[in-house]
Amino acid sequence: MPAMRESMSVDRRGLMLVLSSPSGAGKTTLSRALLADTDNMKMSVSATTRPMRPGETDGEDYFFVEPVDFNLMINRDELLEHAKVFGNYYGTPRAAVEDALSSGNDVLFDIDWQGTQQLAQKMRDDLVSIFILPPSTAALEKRLKSRAQDSDEVVAQRMSKASEEISHWREYDYVVVNDDVDECLSEVRAILKAERVRCSRRTGLIDFVSGLREGY
Ligand SMILES: Nc1nc2c(ncn2[C@@H]2O[C@H](COP(=O)(O)OP(=O)(O)O)[C@@H](O)[C@H]2O)c(=O)[nH]1
Ligand SMILES: Nc1ncnc2c1ncn2[C@@H]1O[C@H](COP(=O)(O)OP(=O)(O)O)[C@@H](O)[C@H]1O
């Protein structure tokens, strides 16, 4: 039984739930935990030119593509948003997102502040954005190093970018601090539960309420 189940008595449009944070703050950890027990939600799989990390799977963690193919996706308007992050290109394939939202399914995004700005410009009503902060700079560096997915040089590069990324926190709908991961996860779940019953998303409300009123 998923921890996050919604009553489907009223049809609704799906939402885009974005998690952004400096590298190492916990986006992937929180995304995987949320997806593991939430119904009607799937992860947006990005395209990237970044090299695959150990343990990553093409088509699951990312679509790993060559720069020339990434540019083709841009030119064919196949990306909902895209950005250059840490010297690599990242972007969101459009089709899967549009299909999910129109069928009432939510899409979870792990994207940076640049991508979030683009989604806010294009699809503000569908967007729910959460910025994840680490409890401290020391904890962030410790987590990046303990993750052991990047070289010392890459860790240093990502730490140097953290302050600039954190400066965008005001652009987000919500901010959570990922100190205790379970507490942080419960805050993200509470945000999702509330946003799922936002009036503007519930396309089936008018019929549902008129059906109720006819009963009296
Ligand atoms: N704009 C945008 N950013 C993305 C996308 N996919 C990943 N990112 C961001 O790119 C940055 C680097 O991601 P990644 O290489 O997986 O490193 P990690 O954050 O250390 O796990 C992170 O800030 C991600 O949120 C995307 O499709 N679009
Ligand atoms: N609340 C937390 N406390 C301690 N370690 C954490 C916490 N959240 C995540 N981590 C660890 O920190 C590292 C980076 O987390 P990750 O989810 O990969 O970050 P991101 O996707 O934002 O780069 C991982 O090793 C993860 O297990």
Image: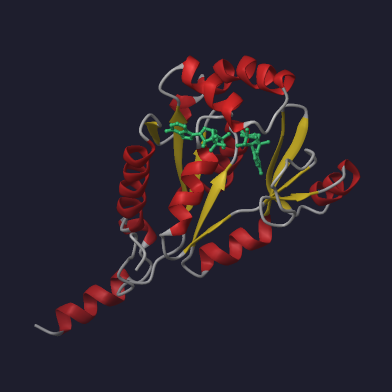
Q: Is residue 26 above or below residue 10?
A: above
Give the color scheme: rainbow, by chain, secondary structure or one colour: secondary structure
Q: Give x and y (percent) for residue 57.
A: 71, 53
Residue drawn at the location 15% of the way across and 78% of the way down: 213
User: 49 or 167, which lies in front?
Assistant: 49
Residue ID at (22%, 73%): 209
Quarter of image, ligand 1? top right
Judge by depth and name the residue closer to the eye, 181 or 47. Answer: 181
In the drawing, does residue 81 fall left or right of residue 4?
right
Residue pushed farthest bottom? 215
Q: Is residue 25 visible?
A: yes
Is residue 15 at least partly visible in the picture? no
Q: Where on the picture, by quarter, is residue 67?
A: top right
Kindly identify the residue that appears in the image at 33 percent across and 73 percent down.
8
Quadrant of the rendered structure where residue 84 is?
top right
View extreme (left): residue: 216
Q: Which quarter of the image is occupied by the N terminus?
A: bottom left
Q: Find residue 44 and report its horizontal and vertical position in percent.
A: 60, 53
